[in-house]
Amino acid sequence: MPRRFKILFKILLLFCALALAVDARAFDVSTTGTVSLRYQSGADLALLNPGVQYPDYGFAAAYLMPELDFNQGEWLNGTIELYTGELSTRTFSSDSLDLYGVESAKNYFNDTYFVRQAYLDFSPDESINIYVGQREIVGGSKLLFDNYQPSFTFDYDMTDALGVPLSLDLNVVKVEPYKLYDPSRTSMFYDAELSYSFSLFEYVTLFYSNFEDTDNTLAPLLDNIVYTSLFNRATYNTLVSRYGRLKAAQIMACLQKEYASGGPVRSSSTSINWTGITGDRYFGRFELGATGILEFGSGTVDGDNCFANSAPFTRSFGTYGYLADVKLKYHVRHLATLGIFFNLSSGDKAPADAIIKQQTLNSFLAIFPYNTETNLFFNGGINQDINTGSLAMAGRRGLGDVAYGADLDFYPVKPIEFAVVPAIIYPEVGDSDYGFETDFTFTYTLNKHASFPFELDYFWPGEFFQGQNISSIVQVLSGADISW
């Protein structure tokens, strides 16, 4: 039996044993779960994984996520959800095994078997909820932090005490990054939110968040910014004019070598703060959603300087950025939703200089952003699950993005839904453009237990991939979702 099937069998056996071990007389127990089947194709798989020598252009996969829920009265609830995929068959190269699956990429682990959620919900009073364990955390805004992480959460609904619908949420999160350079050290994310609820779906939230990077969580992002900022034809010509052809070739070769071995930035420590407001409000059939975030902080990196024969360096730099996201939707009874959106994240004309020359990095940084408004290269698209392993919302080169788009969602009959999301994207700084993307999604929902999605994404990248001859990208994703 293949190793991955043995591991899957052991996890399912553990899950069943745990369910049997719970005393049904003391707890109310229920089991739920989801099976997702996917086929995905598209050249973007190669582009988003530059370290893979012979990348695959598609894969078929199955994802199994069983969940056990138990409760004791109204004061104690528990959830355990396992992620027992991805069981996948790559369609081409064996090297493509280095590619992460859809959910694995969002969880930032090169491991396809893990506990997705395992937490307790303790409610000593009807206005207080305390969560302990690993679960999905939205910190401040989905555009800032949305991921499954170990955390402690304190929620206090002040409606009864104050007579106004206010609530206070406090989150302390242990951040598990894309690369665990030093597992003995832990980066922490702190979040405080004050929300006013107009109704069940209408709210406004003020928040303050802080990220303390002590185990090099930021290093992979800074490596990517340095590499994509410097390793291109335009930069090579600039280096030739400044250092001469031989030295320029040596610098570029060093950057390429360092990037392949983990990057020229070896370690990072940062303290970054965000303060912002987010909310959603209905005005008749119109729905207005908006988010605004201001970011400020500082950081220090250590690594090897390719401009000085790979000599070790230590650099300190500041961080500053801002983000705005606005969407307006019109609901046409039970037939459709028509919307427009605007998305902006700040960028930096020379982000590598901020790191190398100890300046201020103006590219907006986020921890685990989940952006479904713009395109897949800014952490949306691809069924809105893959993100690019980046902590930034500022694009591959750190130039930021400005996106104007529309969101058209049609559901003429109950089992059918058709959505179109076109967007025009520009960098926030500079005179280039990032092109145009349109995402088409069709979903047939057989019943509450089964649905069949199909998605087609087209992206004309403009100058998004600087120095690469890429005219357009087409991706297809299809499959089935079955729940019980």
Image (cartoon, grey):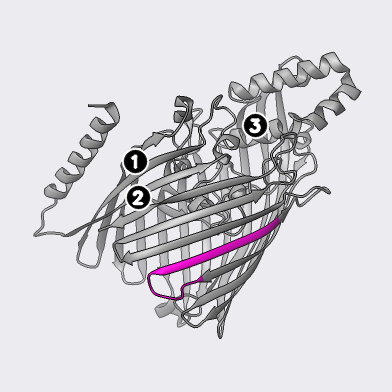
Q: SS of the residue at dot 1?
A: loop
- The residue located at (51%, 76%) in the rendering is 336
- For label 2, the crowd category at 10 Å Cα-Cα, with few meaning under 14, some 14 to 19 and many 20 or more, is some
Q: Is residue 312 visible?
A: no
Q: Residue furthest bottom?
A: 284
Q: Nearer the viewer, mark 2 or mark 3?
A: 2
- Residue 34 horizontal side relative to residue 53, left or right: left
The residues tagged by marks 3 and 1 sit, at their Cα atoms, a distance apart of 29 Å
Q: Could you tell me the amino acid type at mark 1?
A: Gly
Kindly identify which residue carries mark 2: 36
Q: Which residues are magenta?
A: 410-424
Res 223 label? 3
Q: Main secondary structure of the magenta part?
A: strand
- The residue located at (51%, 72%) in the rendering is 410
Q: Earlier in the sequence, mark 2 or mark 3?
A: 2
Discs 3, 1 touching: Cβ within 8 Å: no
Residue 249 locus on image (x, y percent)? 79, 17
Q: Quadrant of residue 250?
A: top right
Q: Residue furthest right?
A: 241
Of residues 154 and 343, the one nearer the viewer is 343
Q: Could you tell me the amino acid type at mark 2?
A: Ser
Residue 274 locus on image (x, y percent)? 62, 54
Discs 2, 3 touching: Cβ within 8 Å: no
Kindly identify which residue carries mark 1: 85
Discs 1, 2 touching: Cβ within 8 Å: yes
Q: Nearer the viewer, mark 3 or mark 1?
A: 1
- Residue 404 horizontal side relative to residue 54, left or right: right
Q: Is residue 149 magenta?
A: no
Q: Earlier in the sequence, mark 1 or mark 2?
A: 2
